[in-house]
Amino acid sequence: MANKRDKVVVAMSGGVDSSVAACLLVERGYQVIGLFMRVGMEQPHECNGHDDGLPGRSRSGCCSAADARDAHLVAGMLGIPLYALDFKSDFEPIIDYFVDEYAVGRTPNPCIVCNEKLKFGKMVEYADAVGAKYIATGHYARIQRRDSKPLLTRGVDHGKDQSYVLFGLDRPVFDRVMFPVGELTKKAVREHARRLGLHNRDKPDSMEICFVPDNDHARLLRERRPEIFVEGDVVDDENNVVGRHRGAAQYTIGQRRGLGIAAGKPIYVTRIDTDTNTITVGGRDALLSSVLIADRVNFLADPPSERFRAHVQIRYQHRAAPATVCRMDESRVRVVFDQPQSAITPGQASVIYDGDVVVGGGWIEQAEGRVDTSVKTPHRADA
């Protein structure tokens, strides 16, 4: 149980969520130490679409001078120390991962990997160095306890919930982490910011990745892996050539725009094969699959059995769907959805929920059980 005089290292990005998180902890009597973490590139963008209390949470810049100024203004108002640490060199493997995933036809989620491999680990290291028992961020998530064990759960504001991007963290971290805004809605956070007189109370969120200016990931791929931009065929489900693409690496499952094909109806990328340098397209129904295989699974709560019921979320904006989860081995699961899901995308995270509790998650390896919409279910008079 936390003692109100315990030291807490708070990741302060200059955004409203992390600023309010720091303010709430000060109001509760904790000894707060602010940490501004410089990661990524000095571009006018930010990571993962929300202020998670980590660097670069405004449209004015990822770890920019403006963000640093905003964080210092809040720290000064609170009378707490704020230290800036440079982790840009540590960030390079995250960019390599991002590029490598696209190069083999998968769609990466660098914010999850960055949380897992870099940000929270660095925060714990710094907390240990300054004798702080806890770390805190502005994530919309919560920590609850069951049998004295910490459990990661969704934030109160399900529209802003960020538990999905935290599934990869090590379980022991949750004994030390606090999410002060997890019990609040975004509206309530801004109301707190106005009550506190924070200058950044109306600072907007962004949906951009911190190291991809203007969301132009193709530009970054061309700079780092120009050899993968080889033109190839675009085919339909019957393998008829319907067009040409400009490099398979710049496409993702479910993509509709930028295909350059006049089909007379909406068409989407349904498959990417980098071995043959081929992209398959089809109608919306062709995106439906009922099964996925996930690997590198990390359990944050003990699963109830080898086969269990849950709700499973397959991307950040996806509404978790009911499914049966079957453990294949220590690191892989098979998820069978009650109803087919659209655009199950290799490389994205598949996160398992029991109500609001994060049971665990893994990385989508492949989708199976594609729905054959050409076969109509016969009408049954006795149905």
Image: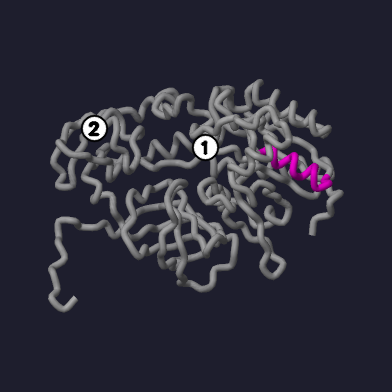
Observer-nearest residue: 238 or 208?
208
Give, as a single range, the part of the protein colored magenta. Answer: 18-30
Identity, as a three-letter code, of the amino acid under mark 1: Gly
Q: Residue at x 18, y 47 (%)?
A: 237
Picture quarter with the N terminus: bottom right
Q: Give the residue pinned by disc 1.
A: 49
Above or below — where is 338 with respect to 219?
below
* Residue at the outermost bottom position: 382
**Residue 35 appears at what percent x and percent y?**
73, 35
Give the mark, 1 or 2, whose residue is nearer the N terminus: 1
What number is the disc on residue 196?
A: none
Q: Please say whether residue 369 is one of the residues in the magenta stretch.
A: no
As drawn, which residue projects farthest toward the right? Answer: 5
Secondary structure of residue under mark 2:
strand
> Residue at position x 16%, y 36% from top?
263
For the C terminus, the image quarter is bottom left
Give the quadrant of residue 277: top left
Residue at label 2? 232
